Amino acid sequence: SHPQVYHTLFRPKDDDNPLLLQFDVVLGNFLVQGANVGRLPVQVITDRDFTRAFSGSVIFECQPSAQIGTSITANSFHGSKFKFIYDYNIKSLTIKQITNTGEYEFITHEVLNGDVPYLLKEDYNHWWNKTIEEVEFRSR
């Protein structure tokens, strides 16, 4: 630990997982679980699934969660919150959408090879609706 970096463990009331909070007084950085607050990590915004799901043009204000590699949107986007889980070991991104009616998970289009016609696979994004256990096709 650097002398200019102060840290503490914060334990939310309803959660047993403490958050590591750090503040670098020299650089002015505030970190939660070692990640910057505000923007998604570069590994997330450059991931092919992120650029496909959001056309690479959306900037989310996010905050890290207690789970390492996980960021949650701070504000709603089209009435939904999003959770981005990046596994640094296998360089894989999971995108979850949380709405008032349920939870969706982005499906990589390669998973559907041979299962749906080419244009349905290429021209649409695919979201697994966990609540009703159906795949939703959304135009890109």
Image: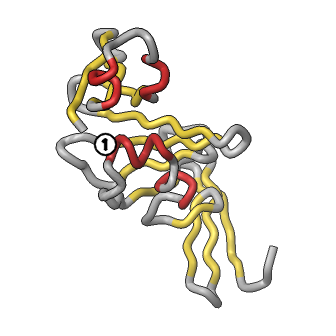
The structure residue drawn at horizontal position 27% and vertical position 30%, both measured from the top left corner, is 124
The structure residue drawn at horizontal position 73% and vertical position 41%, both measured from the top left corner, is 89
Q: How crowded is mark 1: few (under 14 residues within 10 Å), some or many (20 or more)?
A: some
Residue 75's image quarter? Answer: bottom left
Residue 31's image quarter? Answer: bottom right
Horizontal placement of 138 versus 82: left or right? Answer: left
Residue 42's image quarter? Answer: bottom right
In-front residue for pair 15/89: 89
Q: Where is residue 17 in the image (x, y as percent from the top left)?
A: 62, 41
**Which residue appears farthest toward the front when viewing the image?**
118
Considering only vertical position in the picture, is 2 above or below 91? below
In-front residue for pair 18/38: 38
Horizontal placement of 1 versus 106: left or right? Answer: right
Image quarter in which the C terminus is found: top left
Image quarter in which the N terminus is found: bottom right
Q: What element carries label 1?
A: strand
Q: Position of residue 92 (x, y in %)?
A: 60, 38
**Which residue appears farthest toward the bottom when viewing the image?**
26
Q: Where is residue 133 in the image (x, y as percent from the top left)?
A: 34, 9
Q: Residue under label 1, please give it.
A: 81
The structure residue drawn at horizontal position 32% and vertical position 47%, both measured from the top left corner, is 54
**Which residue appears farthest toward the left when viewing the image?**
78
Considering only vertical position in the picture, is 132 above or below 81? above
In-front residue for pair 115/39: 115
The structure residue drawn at horizontal position 50% and vertical position 35%, both measured from the top left corner, is 94
Q: Where is residue 85 in the image (x, y as percent from the top left)?
A: 53, 41
Horizontal placement of 76 versus 115: left or right? Answer: left
Q: Mark 1 belongs to which amino acid?
A: Lys
